[in-house]
Image (cartoon, rainbow, N blue to C red):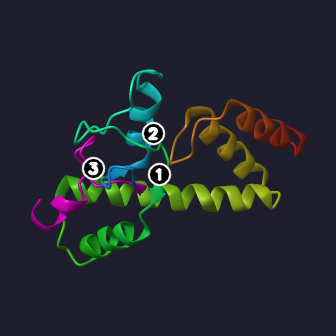
Amino acid sequence: HGVAEEFVCPLTLSLPLDPVIAADGKLYDREAIAEHIRRAPRPPAVLRSPVTNQPLTSTTLIPAHQARNAIQRLIATGAVEGDLADRWVRHQRDQHDAQVIKRRAEGGDVPSMRLLAGLYHHGERGVERNVEESAKWFSRAAEGGD
């Protein structure tokens, strides 16, 4: 992995799709560290860093925009290739596609409403699974004649 090693999430062992910094100062993929926090034992047990095993003093996750930009540049210049880069590029493309579909749906495009409902229903293309949003968009698509 070479130059990309410092950006690899210690939980997923891949480049973070949505990089964040946790209270331990380490870089993680948001979804992976959020899951670690959700699964942690509840007080009085202490939430611990998955890397250092030291107590995490906060569950606040800070977006790591500079890391995301650096990863993007490393991939664009070919400094990072293979599975690490491919997965990251696919995720970014999926997120972009989902945003386009959402804009079209919000603009009244009925087929896009149906597509967006499906994305919410299945939790695909970077869209978090949300049954309520799915039902809302399926209903709007039906009202629009779908």
User: What x and y, as percent, mark residue 34?
Assistant: 45, 39
On residue 106, which mark appears? none
- Using the rendered view, name the quadrant where residue 65 is placed: bottom left
User: What x and y, as percent, mark residue 106?
Assistant: 78, 57
Measured Cα–Cα span from mark 1 to mark 2: 8 Å
Q: Earlier in the sequence, mark 1 or mark 3?
A: 3
Magenta stretch encompasses residue 5: yes
Drawn side of residue 59 relative to residue 135, left or right: left
Region of the chain picked out in magenta, as a range: 1-20
**Marks 1 and 2: which is nearer the front?**
1
Magenta stretch encompasses residue 57: no
Work out whether 73 lies above or below 84: below
Residue at (24% x, 73% y) in the render = 74
| Label 2: how many Cα within 10 Å (few below 14, some 14–19, many 20+) | some
Measured Cα–Cα span from mark 2 to mark 3: 13 Å
Q: Nearer the viewer, residue 25 or 87?
A: 25
Residue at (24% x, 36% y) in the render = 53
Residue at (41% x, 64% y) in the render = 64
